[in-house]
Image (spheres, rainbow, N blue to C red):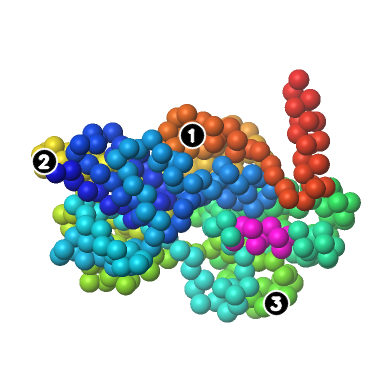
Amino acid sequence: MLRKHVVIIGGGWGGMALARHLRKIPKNKIRISLISDDQNFRYSPGLYRVATGHREKEAVIPITDLTAKIDSLEFIKARATHINRSKKIVNIEGGQEIHYDYLVISVGAVTNFFDIPGLKERSFGIKTPREIHKFRAHLHQTLIDDKKPDKNYVVVGGGPTGVELSAALASYIKKVTKRHGLPASKINIELVQAGSRLIPQSQPKASKLVLTRLRKLGVKVHLNAKVEGESEDSLRYNNRSIPTRTVIWTAGTTNNALFKAHRNHFPLSPSGRVIVDERLRVDAYIYVIGDNAETPFSGLAFTAVQNAKYVASDIKKRLYGQLKTPYYRPLQPLTAIPVGARWAVFQRKNIVISGFLGGVLRSFADLVGYIDIAGFGMGLKLWLGSSHKEEKCYICQTAIKKEDWVTQSSYS
């Protein structure tokens, strides 16, 4: 029997978790092609840390490193340009045609600026290494080279990324200014949220704990604040303005343009996500998972990994002739949101734990996340390295070594 060809489009959480689970199928039954226009997997929970002085290698990981031990897998660095469902073909850049027996699409969401004037042109992001490098260069330029720091550094979006970043930024800017002997007392970190509470997908109790913690860290939080536009030196909201040259946008995403370009293939929900059946499929041979699929709890890494586990199981059963597989059953995700060093809010259903213990649980969740995409050995190594700090600035790098020595000495 000829080997079945599974084509995965997307090297994010869904794609990488799926590849790991498919590796268990014997090589004589399956071959896997993973197509991504990015050569790296981005560990999204760690990107805010890279933006605030931590090492990049644990958050931006080459896909070839993660798939090196999957003998049945071929990585293709390219962008998928067209899908022909009737012929079961994916076209990629350069015109190459790739035939599939099963196609799994998990290309992630993209930033949505909601057509708000000035944001796309002026705001910073932290979704990609390029965006992070640009943001850190800007911070270095304003804080150190020009010695003209912004009075206000503004994060827009009260979801997990916005909360994590604003808390980390408050601590990071204090450290950088201290290392360089600059005054930090007049620098504000401001978090702008359109809704009435932070992390609205969580329990109200968790939202209140996060708000209290941010304020304790010195972050100014603006709720019910609808952003109207960004100019060269200010952010406008609710007919008010905040003087700033630094706005970090974390407030919105939309589905990948691949699906809009193939509307005839993919039925879309009002949210723009793809409508899938009880087996996460749009037809007998195409699965859509992760941020792209209209499923309960879509938009979370946890959900993408659960989707991937199910699809791997479904494909395996089909390969072995077990056509009647159980339907996908979504698991309610746990959330663990860090708000500053060694402090987090952890939530599982109605259970909410905050403080140091929440931070411990968040650290454990990071370990599980790394193992999901890298396996135990490599995942453990990445997790252990994720707390390492790194700066290009010599003064900051020297200060980090002293700070680490003091921390280690205090525990010896």
**Is the residue under label 3 in contact with that under label 2 (CB below 8 Å)?**
no
Question: On the rendered structure, is 131 left or right of 68?
Answer: right
Please tell me whether mark 2 or mark 3 is closer to you in this view: 2
257 above or below 402?
below
Query: Residue 236: x, y in percent?
Result: 65, 75
**Mark 1 burial class by Cα count in 10 Å: few <14, some 14-19, many 20+:** many
Q: Could you say which is closer to the camera, residue 6 or residue 194?
A: 6
Question: On the rendered structure, is 286 left or right of 299?
Answer: left
Q: Is residue 220 visible?
A: no
Name the quadrant containing residue 350: top left
Please tell me whether mark 1 or mark 2 is closer to you in this view: 2
Name the quadrant containing residue 221: bottom right
Q: Which labelled disc corresponds to residue 246?
A: none
In this figure, which residue is indicated by the disc labeled 1? 379
Disc 1 to disc 3, C-alpha distance:
42 Å
Q: Give the SS element for disc 3.
A: loop
102 above or below 375?
below
**Bounds of the magenta segment:** 131-139
Q: Give the main secondary structure of the magenta stretch.
A: helix
Name the amino acid type tagged 3: Glu
Along the polypeptide, which appears first: circle 2 or circle 3? 2
Q: Could you say which is closer to the camera, residue 48 or residue 99?
A: 99
Question: At 40% across and 56% down in the image, what residue appears?
Answer: 77
In this figure, which residue is indicated by the disc labeled 2? 1
Name the amino acid type tagged 1: Gly
**Mark 2 burial class by Cα count in 10 Å: few <14, some 14-19, many 20+:** few
**Is the residue under label 2 in contact with that under label 1 (CB below 8 Å)?**
no
Query: Residue 355: x, y in percent?
Result: 62, 36
